[in-house]
Amino acid sequence: MRRTTILLVAALAVVAAACTTVPGPEPTTPARRVGAAGGPAGPAIFAAPVLQAFESCDAFLGYVKGHALERVGPYGLEGYGGGPFPPDVVFAEGDAGRRLDGGVPTTTAAGVAGVDYSATNVQVTGVDEPDLVKTDGKRIFAVAQGRLYRIDAGATPRVVASLPLDGWGQELFLAGDRLLVMTSMDGYGIEPLAEGGLVDGGIVPGPSPRTVLTEVDVSDPATMVPVRTLTMDGTILSSRMSDGRVRLVVRSEPTGFAWVFPEGGGIRAEREAAAENRRIVERSTLENWVPWFVLEDHQARTTSEGPLLGCDQVGQPAEFSGLSMLTVLTIDLATGLEPGRGIGLLAEGQTVYASNASLYVATAPWMAWPHAPAGGEGLGSDGLTTQIHMFDITDPDIARYVASGEVDGTLLSQWSMDEYDATLRVVVTDENPWWGSSEVPDTSVVTLRRLGDRLVQVGSVDGLGEGERVYAVRFIADRGYVVTFRQVDPLYVVDLSDPTDPRVAGELKITGYSAYLHPIGDDLLLGVGQDATDRGRVLGTQVAVFDVSDPSRPRRLAKLTVDEAYSDVEWDHRAFLWWPPEGVAVLPLQRWSWDERTGKEDLFSGAVVVRATSDRVVQVGEIRHPSTARSDCPGCTAWSAPIVRSLVIDDRLFTVSDAGVLVSDLGSYDDLAWVPFTS
C-alpha cells in the first residue's frame, strides 16, 4: 500500500483568461535585496529566450496583478488565502519507491560509501536525497523526538551531542563537516537554532507555511554548532544534493494581503468588499508575490532579510500556471547558506525528480483550483493532465529553467519520471487518484525530449494495467518496470531502447503486488509489497525476487510472506536497505493481529533481515528495539518503538527508531549495544 498526503479542500472551480497588464508601483526597498529589481532577465537562469522571463519589476507586477484582478473577490484571492472555502492545498510527494543503489561511492576518513558503510537509498546514482538519518561511516546524525542527535559510531557507540528542533518533517543532508537541517513550520514561533539550544528569534507573524534551513558545523567531534539559519516563505516539495550542492524546491503563495470581508450579508456588502480587495491587489508590491527570507548568522550575530527573488530571477511558463511561486534554491554547503542563488517560476509544484544534469517538477493543474479550465476539464477521468517543468542543474551555482511540457494523466510519485539519454520517460495513469472515475483506468509510458522551450512527446505505449492502479515504477537503463494491481499483480516490462517507439515486451501476472522494486544483481529485481488472494485481499508483507533477463518472459523465482504485516518500504524507499556484500535486505516491519478465540494479540515492531538470491528468499534475522510495558493494555505484549532506518558500518548493523539506536552483529544479528536517545 502506498501513502499519499495531499489535502485538497474547496470545490475545484473556474477561470482561465487572457492576461491584463495593470501597472503597479515600484516595490519597496528591503533591508537586503537579492537580484536586480528592474534589469533585463538574466540569460544564465532562463536559457531559452522565449520562456518569457520578466524584463522589469513593472512587467512582473503587471502580470501577477492582471491575473489576480481576474480572481479576487469579496473573500480575497481565490485559492491563495481568500475565498469562502479554506484554500490550502498541501502537497507531499507520497512516494512509494525510488531508483538504483545507495549513491555513488564516496571516500571519507571512515571508508567508502557502499563498501564500508551504507548511504541513503536513492533513486539516481550520485544524487543524494534528504533523510532522517545520515552517516559518513564514523558519525551518525539522526532526527528523533524533536531533536537532532549526533552519535559516535566508533567501537563504543554513544550519543555525543543533541540540539532541539521546532516544526515537523525535518530532514538532513551531510557534506563533509557541514550538516543541513531542513524543517517545515506553520509560521508561528519560528526561532532559529543556536549553540546549546534556541536563541531569541522572535515570532514570524501569520499562519502561512515556512521553510527553515539550518547550517550546522559538525567539525568538532564532541558537539554540533549552528552557523546560520535561513527562514523563508513556502513549503518544501523536495530537495537533492550532488557534489555538496543542494537544490531545494519550495512552493510559496502570495503573502501579506489584509483582505476585506463583507460586513453582514447581501450583494452590496460583497460588492464593496470585492472593490476594496481589488484596490489591495493594485497597491501590492514585489514583497507580496515572491517569498520573503530572513537570514541569521549566529556567529556574526547579524540578521538580513528581503525578497528571496528579484524580478530578474522570476519567469513564467508559456501558459499561465497559477500565481504560486516555484523556487529552486541552490545551496553550496562548502560556502554556507546564502539566499541569492535562486530562480523562481510562476507555477504550481508537486512531484520532484532529479538526474545528475536536470531537475523536473511536475504538478497536476486541476489541483490548483483557482486556475482550473472553464467547464471543468481536467477534473474527471477525461482530460487529466500533468505539467512538467525542466531545470538545467549542470551549473554548480544556480539552476536554469529551460522547458515545460504536459502529459495526459497523473503520476504516482517521483519514480514515475526518469531521464536517460536526453529522454524523459514518464508513467501516467488516467484515473483521478482522489475520487476515481466511471471509466476503466489505463496506464501509459510516455517519452519526451526537449525542443527549444518545450518538452515534446516523441513516443508512448498504453494499455498497461487496464482497470488497475499503478503501485510501483522502476526505470533501469533502456527498460521500464511497472506494477499495477487490483486483484492480481501484473509486472510489465517496457522496452525503451527506441524512445520513439516504446513497447511492452512482456508481463507477469501473479497474486499480490510490489510497491517498491530494487535491482539486486544482473537481471534480478527484488519487490517489496503485499501478498494477496486471487480476489485481491492483502495478506501481509511480501518480498519477492524476479528474473527479468528475458524481457518477454519475466518470472518470479522466489518469495517470502510475513502474515498480517506491512513495511514502511511500501511508501518510503529510504526505509529500505540492500547490502550487496551480504546479499541481504533490511526492512522495517509492523505486524498486529488479534486471536478472538484465545484473546491474545500478536504484535511485532522492528525490522527483519532477508537474504535474497535467485533460488530463495529467507528471513535470516529479526531486530527489535528494547520494549516498554503498555499502560493502556496491562495484559498486552510490550511495545517497541518502530524502526525507521537501517544502515551498515563495517561489520555492524545499526537500526534507528525514535527511542534510540541498536547496534547488531552483521553476521549473527545478535545485539551488541543499545544507544538510547535522551534529552
Image (cartoon, rainbow, N blue to C red):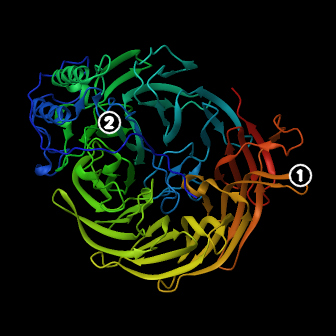
Q: Is residue 156 visible?
A: yes
Q: Position of residue 383 (x, y in %)?
A: 29, 60
| Residue 13: image location, x then y, percent | 30, 44
Residue 256 in the image: above or below residue 318: above
Q: Quadrant of the C terminus?
A: top right
The CA distance from mark 2 to mark 1 is 51 Å
As rendered, which of 437 and 642 lies closer to the eye? 437
Residue type, numbered disc 1:
Gly
Q: Residue at x 49, y 45 (%)?
A: 130
Helix, strand or loop for disc 1 = loop
Q: Name above or below for residue 20 compared with residue 443.
A: above
Q: What residue lies at 62% left-to-right and 69% top-to-bottom?
A: 536
Seen from the viewer's position, the closer of residues 50 and 188 is 188
Which residue type does callout 2 highlight?
Gly
Q: Residue at x 42, y 70 (%)?
A: 440
Q: Look at mark 1 in the image and give the residue it sits on.
A: 599
Labels in figure, total: 2
Q: Is residue 218 left or right of residue 235?
A: right
Q: Nearer the viewer, residue 312 or 565?
A: 565
Q: Which mark is residue 192?
A: none
**Residue 583 seen:** no
Badges 2 and 1: C-beta atoms under 8 Å apart?
no
Relative to 239, is 122 above or below? below
Q: Position of residue 274 (x, y in %)?
A: 22, 24
Q: Which residue is mark 2?
A: 79
User: Which element carries disc 2, helix, strand or loop?
Assistant: loop
Residue 181 at x, y = what percent? Answer: 49, 34
Quadrant of the image for the N terminus? bottom right
In the image, taking residue 605 as reference, residue 209 lies left or right, namely: left
Q: Quadrant of residue 84?
A: top left
Task: Judge the density around disc 1: few (<14), some (14-19), many (≥20) Cα neighbours within 10 Å.
Answer: few
In screen coordinates, is 617 left or right of 226? right
